[in-house]
Image (cartoon, rainbow, N blue to C red):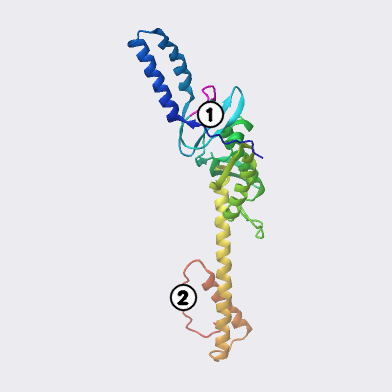
Amino acid sequence: MTNEKISTPKSGYLMLIVALVLIALAIIASSYLRNSTGLLVVPIILLLLPGFMIVNPNGSKVLILFGAYKGTVKANGFFWTNPFYKKERISLRARNFDSERLKVNDKKGNPIMISVILVWRVDDTYRAAFDVDNYENFVRVQTDAAVRKLAGSYAYDNFDDDQAEFTLRSGLQEINVALEKELDERLEIAGIHVHEARIGYLAYAPEIASAMLRRQQAEAIVAARFKIVEGAVGMVELALQQLSEKNVVDLDDDKKAAMVSNLMVVLCGDKDVSPVVNAGTLHQ
């Protein structure tokens, strides 16, 4: 629920004309009529001047009279209001906030470095002005709190759990949606609307980065070896099948075992194999 009230003040051009007329009368009374009564107009003119204000596009002015909220001017232009109003400027433009890189623990307790990029704007000037002490600082503090909560709810990567639905590294789209929703709920009290929130930086903390890199490399090597062995077994099986179907050579179990062993060494080795020419029989 909002307590914001939209105020429409008088045009500033009309009151500017009135002020200029009073100035002219004061000059005429003092210079030509030699009458000091023209000086009495000066306090009136000085009283009118604080009432003038300019509201730029996508800007606003919150009007306060002796501690009482009187409304918000969101229309842009040149206006005149009660000169006793205190006018607090609040921008309605969209703003970018790139948070600092925070060191937090993910769901598995691993220290990581993370930062977010937030696009926000003030939607309710009453809440921004009166429900929080400083709405810009409120955005920074709540963003840090939301990032810490988000990082503690998800693992950085699914090293040990291949069934993990989302991780900070692999599920960025879903994580960004959850982050935006969390921030929108936190900043609603300050009348702030979140247009976009996304992770801007994500990495392991320096003290474990090298160890995690070696772990990733090891997993990549194991996965590659698995594919190599899987392909080699298929090739050996196909070779034995074709040799048997075409009656190229009659192989007993011992010869098949030797052939399989040699083929697996050739296909799975990480170095080139030097061929050996057998000048004797198959049994030598």
SS label for mark 1: strand
SS label for mark 2: loop
Q: Amino acid at mark 1?
A: Glu
Picture layout, residue 97 above or below residue 173: above
Q: Residue at x 57, y 77 (%)?
A: 234
Sooner in the amino-acid sequence: mark 2 or mark 1? 1
Q: Residue at x 62, y 86 (%)?
A: 252
Picture layout, residue 86 above or below residue 252: above
* The label number, if any, that marks residue 196 in the structure image: none
Per the model, the C-alpha gap separating discs 2 and 1 is 87 Å
Q: Give how far across and how far down residue 272 sits, in percent.
A: 46, 69
Q: Is residue 237 left or right of residue 77?
A: right
Q: Which residue is mark 1?
A: 88
Q: Say few, some or many: other residues with alpha carbon within 10 Å of mark 1 (under 14 / 14 to 19 / 20 or more).
A: few
What secondary structure do most residues of the magenta stretch adopt? loop
* The label number, if any, that marks residue 275 in the structure image: 2
**Location of residue 22 by image quarter:** top left
Q: Residue furthest left?
A: 32
Which residues are drawn in magenta? 80-85
Q: Quadrant of the C terminus?
A: bottom right
